[in-house]
Amino acid sequence: MKLVQWTALQRFYATVGSSVVVLLFAALTYAGMTRQQEIQRRADRSGRIIRNLELTLSRMADGETGQRGFLLTGDEKYLAPYGAAERDVQRYLSVLDTLTRGDEHQRARLDTLAMLSRAKFEELDRSLAVRRTSGLDAALAVVATDSGRVLMDEARRVTNDLEQAESGLLQDRLDRETQYAREVRIILVVGTVLAVAAALLTNVLLGRYAREREIAARELDRHNARLREQSEELELQNRQLHEQALEMELQQQQLQEQTGEMELQTEQLEQANDALQSAVSDLERERSAAMAARAQAEAANTAKSEFLATMSHELRTPLNAISGYVDILSMGIRGPVTDQQVEDLDRVRKNGRYLLALINDILNFARLEAGQVEFTPADVEVRDILLGLEPIVAPQMAAAGVRYSCDVGAPGVRVHADYERVRQILLNLVTNAIKFTPEGGSVAVSCGCSEESVTLSVVDTGRGIAQEKLERIFEPFVQVDRHLTSVSQQGVGLGLAISRDLARRMGGDITAESEAGKGSCFRLTLPGAVASRGAVAPRNSSVDAVAEDVHTSGRTR
């Protein structure tokens, strides 16, 4: 069957004809609406000009009213409308000047009106001045010259000319707006009819083309069905021939794949066996090395513990003996001593205590590293710990000339920690604050708590620590700004390291905030006590034990 062919004109119309009609219709409509909006804008401008002219003439008349009231009464209150009228006239004339730009005739009339308004208000000002200086009769004589009425009549005439001109323009624009509105409606009607006609014609053409294509498609389907039947018969024969060849090739391929898989599995097994043997050898060597290293570490730790125990006995015993002999000499048991000798003995005693504190710091640090420090955690009331601090640190505070304050917090606030270790940490922080706070400064201790933890803060007004050095103060054997510390206050740099290690082993931590020259703030955070536990804070420790903790706390930053 021969397919129907469309002409070039039919194809063009079917594809873009309707779009061209719609676009043309839209362009005409847009042009008409634009022209109508421009006419409307000009008509609105004419209306505004007329309104401002009427307001200008009205306010000039208000000025005359204020003038008459003042001339007759001499009361200044009647001049209030006069002053406002003069300002409003100037404002309305300014608006009119803007609205009449581009119209030379109207601007010429507007210039005349502006000149008349100025002359009118000058005439009013003269009459008011005469009334103030010469009285009512003189002012009435000025009014009787009739110059004000002439000016107002001329202003009304010019205003009337302006209004008539603008009214003519306004009527002309309204007529043109009506004409353009009629043209837009005609365009809308004609465009709608053309669009509907174009759509109907397009539908007719497309419908006819679709029917012709459908008939041709059915005929083509019948031919294709016959060809498919013949092709299927040929394919069936070819399939039967190929199936036999494929079966033979498949069998041969399967044999080859099985052979390749067996070879690959054999190679993989050999590689796995070699890797396993190598791994076993490496594990044996690592195990031997680890056992040797562990033995060496245990031997070194044992040697260190034995050395520290020996050093503790060998050094602390003679130091205690030296301290005892110094006390005997100071008391004069061996004979009288001079004041200079008493001072020397006092220096020996202080240096001995300082050396003993250093040895205790090293021993405590070694015990912490070896895990030999025992903890007895319990629910301890914070109030008891803080109240026990002041009697111990009061002598140091008085000697250093430092003010001390303590906020023990609300009753019943408890922490779950070792009482002695918490007191040891706080004593170390407070003595550190005293040591680095100059005379006249202050040290404050306070307590704060949250739902899960309690924070004890020690704040001083000392020399502070630079930000870049703040993290290093908790490292062992580090004492920042050592050159700024007197020899008697220098330590080995273990006090804060020991204190933070103790806090962390109790489930807490120590943090620091500081700024050079503005003091420091150290915060000890500990886990809060569980509500179901009872307070078991120990209170039977002697003052001597507390003093020993002060010596063993390290007291160095």
Image (spheres, grey):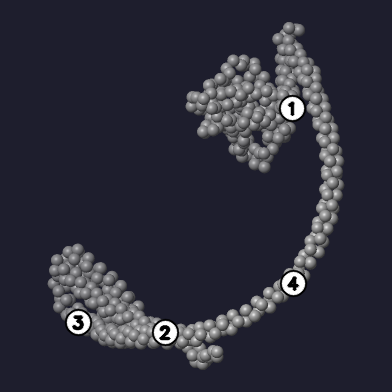
Q: Name the residue under label 4.
A: 242
* Residue that badge 1 annotates: 370
Choose mark 4 or mark 1, whichever is in front: 4
Query: Which one is in front in this view, the residue at disc 4 or the one at disc 3?
Result: 4
Looking at the image, residue 234 lies above or below residue 425: below
Say which quadrant the C terminus sits in: top right
For residue 472, which quarter of the picture? top right
Which residue matches tag 2? 199
Q: Which callout, 4 or 3, points at the residue further toward the start of the chain? A: 3
Q: Position of residue 446 (x, y in %)?
A: 54, 30
Q: Residues within 10 Å of mark 1 (few under 14, many from 20)?
A: few
Contact, mark 4 vs mark 1 (Cβ under 8 Å): no
Disc nearer the start of the sequence (2/1): 2
Question: Would residue 55 be found to the left or right of residue 28 on screen?
Answer: left
Of tags 3 and 2, the one toward the viewer is 2
Q: Is residue 414 left or right of residue 194?
A: right
Q: Name the residue under label 3.
A: 153
Distance CA(mark 4)–CA(mark 3) = 119 Å
Q: Which amino acid, by three-letter code, is at mark 1? A: Ala
Q: What element carries label 4?
A: helix
Residue displayed at 72% across by 8% down: 332
Q: What residue type is labelled 4?
A: His
**Type of amino acid at the residue the image marks with label 2:** Ala
Q: In which quarter of the image is residue 425?
A: top right
The numbered mark, 3 or 1, whose residue comes first in the sequence reads: 3
